[in-house]
Image: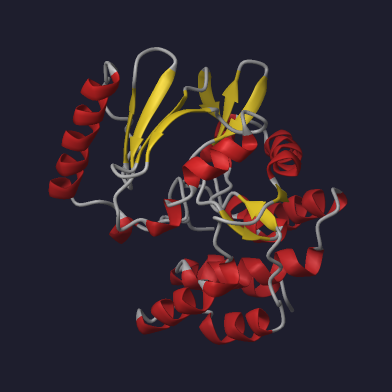
Amino acid sequence: MATLTAVRPSDERDDDAIAPARMRELELAAREVADDWGLELGPPYGLSRYSYVAPAGPDAVLKITPAEDDESDHEADALELWAGDGAVRLLRRDPVRRALLAERADPGTDLSALPDDEATAIAVELGGRLWRPAGAPFRWIGDHVPAWLDQAERDGAELIPLARGLFAGLSPRRATLIHGDFHHHNILRHGGAYVAIDAKAMLGEPEFDVPSFLWNPLDSAMTAERTERRIAAFTAAGLDETRIRAWTVVRGAYLGLGEDPEAADVIRSLVR
């Protein structure tokens, strides 16, 4: 089984990573915010490829999100709603400069090094705390998925016809806050518990969040056996199995996972 090289520590692909010149602009913005807020910035994190993220002293992290990353527009709003229950705590925000200061997870290790069943159990429990009723200002996934599928089709992505048919039958719900990028590398140990980071918060349904977990961690192989075992764990916690499978095809299609033939085979097998 080939490694899923297209899957990164988020659902972004390599061609979505910020260009060096743009990253330097974000670094300058981060240093300006740090000066204004009296923070001492450390070097940016190694996986800081889609926004500028750096430690701000021993207990906080400063993040500057580029304006073009509209999926992260309501990350701070989500952190405010979660208020430290299942996610890092928001300490300060500046919407104009797209800056947020968040609690730093300590020790900050993610789920990727844990045995698979243990990591899955932690994710299932954490998701149950994050998925909660919400409304404005969060946007609804149903208003965005069609455009993402359209763009993926223009890019020549696989799985699009199958994904369109499944999405047409989903009628996505809109009353639950979802994380939007829920996977091993965004779930960090903090003291005696685990918390989420880097939300792409929107309104939808919990089943939308599961696919990201199915094809991670980074540089792991997506196998049918592992995928089925993880789906069973989320289903046992009360999620709808059919909707998990459908969303895995839909999201896999617009994120380009069909570029890996073996991953595409696993994804197709979920709805046969």
Q: Is residue 158 visible?
A: no
Query: How many numbered circles does the render carry?
Result: 0
Q: Residue at x 15, y 40 (%)?
A: 24
Tell me the quarter of the picture where residue 42 sits. top left
- Residue at (24, 32) in percent of width and height: 30
Q: How is the image coloured?
A: secondary structure
Closer to the camera, 221 or 90? 90
Residue at x-position 59% and y-position 24%: 189
Point out the image quarter for the C terminus: bottom right
Q: Is residue 200 left or right of residue 175?
A: left
Extreme top residue here? Answer: 58
Asked whether residue 223 appears in the rendered view, the answer is yes
Q: Quadrant of residue 246?
A: bottom right
Q: Is residue 81 above or below residue 110?
A: below
Q: Position of residue 212 (x, y in %)?
A: 58, 54
Which image quarter: residue 69? bottom left
In the depicted structure, whether residue 225 falls above or below residue 81: below
